[in-house]
Amino acid sequence: SGLAERKAASVTLAARGPLGAAELEGRLDDAEVSVRLAAARALARGEGKSIAALAKEKLDPGAKVSEAHRARWAEFLGRAGEPACEAVLLAAAAEPRHDERVRAAAVAALGPCAGTKALPELKKARGAKSPRLRAAALDALGAIPRSPEAAQWGGEALKETEPEVLAAAVR
């Protein structure tokens, strides 16, 4: 089905509340980011919550959620533009019980969520041992408009030997 139809279906499913949740969960893996985000918003609305509140639950290390699912919720939260996104993502990025994929997703989501306020955390991630976290910091910087740090750090990253970081530097 078309993009507009898939997004509209998410809104319709949200009106069903918990009855539409299973189908909405399937839409969280849609190829189109706008459909994934619409499904996340609809799931949150169906539970009477904001995306930030639902993402906080999904990102809780004690929740019965796969690490891949947690990483998706970090992405949704970063794209949702909700005021509470920064605190939730900072906590997820620093949570040692999360695997590297989740922490990297949280770091990458800080750029679109918090903008230049995220620069101190992104600077820490740029110095991480993990190439995935360093790449995520560069991805986050790319989402911050007119950031001189993005150009500087991107140039520095071109000297990296890790392919994942190099790829992020040229994105």
Image (cartoon, grey):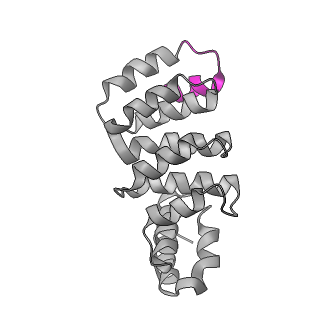
Image spot of residue 15 (x, y percent): 47, 85
* Picture quarter with the N terminus: bottom right
Q: Compared with residue 119, is residue 4 higher up or lower down, i.e. above or below? A: below
Q: Image quarter for residue 20?
A: bottom right
Instruction: Evaluate whether residue 171 shows in this view.
Output: no
Residue at coordinates 49% horizontally, 35% vertically from top-left?
A: 139
Q: Image quarter for residue 163?
A: top right
Q: Compared with residue 76, is residue 148 higher up or lower down, i.e. above or below? A: above
Furthest toward the left, the residue is: 146
Furthest toward the top, the residue is: 159
In this picture, residue 89 sits left or right of residue 149: right
Please name whichever residue, 129 or 171, is drawn nearer the observer in this view of the structure: 129
Image spot of residue 132 (x, y percent): 62, 32
Instruction: Evaluate whether residue 134 shows in this view.
Output: yes
Residue at coordinates 56% horizontally, 28% vertically from top-left?
A: 134
Please name whichever residue, 54 or 29, is drawn nearer the observer in this view of the structure: 54
In this picture, residue 68 sits left or right of residue 11: right
Residue 94 lies in the magenta-colored region: no
Residue at coordinates 45% horizontally, 70% vertically from top-left?
A: 4
Residue at coordinates 48% horizontally, 27% vertically from top-left?
A: 124
Q: Compared with residue 36, is residue 85 higher up or lower down, i.e. above or below? A: above
Magenta stretch: give its range.
159-171
Magenta span dominant secondary structure:
helix
Residue 164 lies in the magenta-colored region: yes
Please name whichever residue, 107 or 84, is drawn nearer the observer in this view of the structure: 84
Image spot of residue 16 (x, y percent): 52, 87
The mark total stands at: 0
Please name whichever residue, 13 or 84, is drawn nearer the observer in this view of the structure: 84
Image spot of residue 33 (x, y percent): 51, 57
